[in-house]
Image: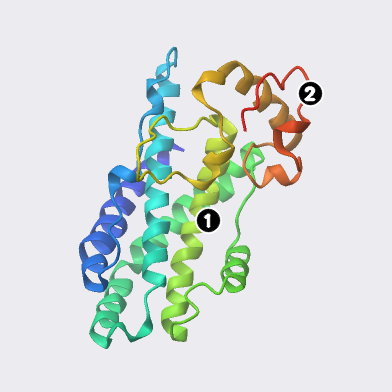
Amino acid sequence: MYLSIPSFIVLNLTIVVLLMQVVLTPVFRLPPVRWADHVFMDRGRIANLFWLDRLNCQFCGYANGLCTMLNTQLDHLAAQKPEQGAQRWAVAAVCAVVTAPLWATFDLYTIRGLYNLVISQCLGMQRFSLAQGAALLERGRYASQHPPAARAVLRLWKNSALALEMCLEQIESSWCPLRHFETREGIVYPKHHKRFFGANVIGELREARNFLQANSGTVSRRAMEVIPSGLDELPPDVQTKRVH
């Protein structure tokens, strides 16, 4: 997992900050996506954590927040109308060509390589294929108002961002499914945090996690399809609190 840290930093500085925030946001007048509303490295404050656990919590907070920012930025761009102006889309096209090698390297190295071929295989986690992503975006008519070329690029970028979201959800929910502490207005949490546990139920978390991992390998929302009513079907001795 730690081998992906350099690639996340590159993704952060080049795609999320330089491409999206510095160039495309002012060009298309996109809604601002604030770092402070998406990236929360707060769970390292949990008492009695081993230093490695604390590091893992910080990494998850950074990676998941960055992924949430990326998906939000892409959605804002995909929602733009094609008649925004040829000059604006020309800028977007140049940016897409320039950043394509960086994006492809991140996708192939971090998602298809480290996660799909190593982490998921070793730990029995679920994977998110390009075909799954393409079908999902087609059903949702993602960026469907754009011409074929622009639509294809936007869907390719979004497909990669969705695959990253799936990877991080699997890792985080299987290892440390704890919600963030931040509660102020404007915060945007990763979607899978809706099923996560509060820090005040650590004991129940350990029991529930052991049960869920033994049955489905994760507590992500995809695994909840195996347990339709969620944690309601946990054994009575585990249902000490309604933590979902």
Q: Which residue is mark 2?
A: 235
Q: Position of residue 119 (x, y in %)?
A: 56, 41
**Residue 4, can we see it?**
no
Q: Position of residue 94 (x, y in %)?
A: 27, 77
Which of the marked residues, 1 or 2, is nearer the chain's N terminus?
A: 1
**Position of 18 relative to 48 (above/below):** below
Which residue corresponds to the image point at 38% horizontal and 33% vertical from the top-left?
182
Q: Position of residue 123 (x, y in %)?
A: 63, 37
Q: Name the quadrant containing residue 80.
A: bottom left
Which residue corresponds to the image point at 41% horizontal and 71% vertical from the top-left?
78
Q: Which residue is mark 1?
A: 163
Left or right: where 232 falls relative to 125: right
Callouts 1 and 2 close, C-beta under 8 Å: no
The span from disc 1 to disc 2 (Cα, nearest Å) is 33 Å
- Residue type highlighted by circle 2: Pro
Crowd band around label 2 with a 10 angstrom C-alpha radius: few (<14), some (14–19), many (20+): few
Q: Secondary structure under badge 1? A: helix
Task: Tell which of 142 and 167 is nearer to you.
Answer: 142
Q: Name the quadrant containing residue 70.
A: bottom left
- Residue type highlighted by circle 1: Ala
Which residue corresponds to the image point at 71% horizontal and 37% vertical from the top-left?
230
**Position of 38 relative to 236 (above/below):** below
Q: Position of residue 222 (x, y in %)?
A: 66, 47
Q: Secondary structure under badge 2? A: loop
Crowd band around label 1 with a 10 angstrom C-alpha radius: few (<14), some (14–19), many (20+): many
